[in-house]
Amino acid sequence: MTYAGLPFALPVLFLLLAGCVPVRPFAPGWTDFDFRVRGRIGGRTAHEAFSASFDWRQAEERFAVELWGMLGQGRTRILGDGRRALVIDARGQVLRDDDLDDLMARALGWHAPVLALRHWVRGTAAPGGALEAAAHDQLGRLASFTQFGWAVELRGWQDTPIGETPRKIIAQRGSYRVTVVCKEWFGPAAE
């Protein structure tokens, strides 16, 4: 699959995961790790690029990410629970794997560090990975660091229903670059 097809494959992957792995609705007992965010994701190599809109719901370890291209085309769902993941593409095909990176590469032709991104979009480093070359901005917020082989930049901090979060996350590993722009955050009661 080429990156040109990624905007269509990603949404299906996220939709699949959302439908096969139960993600509880946000409730009064929500945790600091529960969120819903909408925005854009893009990836680039030296030769190819992709972009897609996304709607990401995170409930503790469970997540459901829906991806789609221009005009809502090619919806893909990616679902996971920290142990298993699945992708549902625009044709309804379901792929499952215990390794999310392998699954995304196989189903979409690319991958993003989704398990770490759930922390990075909130402006924090992911647990379990050494943090290297960390730098902070004038207000003491994490601005850049290296983790899991990804050089990460957090930009454009904004107030959201879950606190202050970066608007843009840029993660680069080798010649591969992933950019996430978080446009809309929802509080714990959002569906």
Image: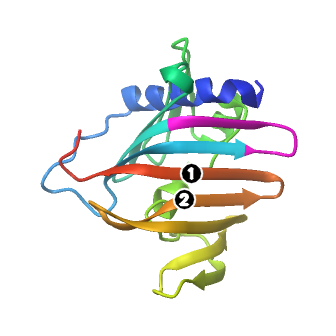
Q: In the image, residue 181 lies at what x, y percent?
A: 52, 51
Please count the marks in the image: 2
**In the image, 162: left or right of 111?**
left
Quadrant placement of the C terminus: top left
Q: Which residue is mark 1?
A: 180
Query: Residue, x 22% and y 44% (percent of image)?
Result: 190
Identify residue type, mark 2: Lys
**Can residue 15 be seen by looking at this rendering?**
yes
Q: Position of residue 40 (x, y in %)?
A: 53, 43
Image disc number at residue 168 = 2
- The secondary structure making up most of the magenta span is strand
Q: Is residue 29 magenta?
A: no
Give me the residue at 63% from left, 82% from top. Answer: 134
Q: Is residue 120 above or below residue 82?
A: below
Asked which quadrant contains residue 4, the reply is top right
- Tell me where residue 177 appears, x and y as whole percent: 73, 52
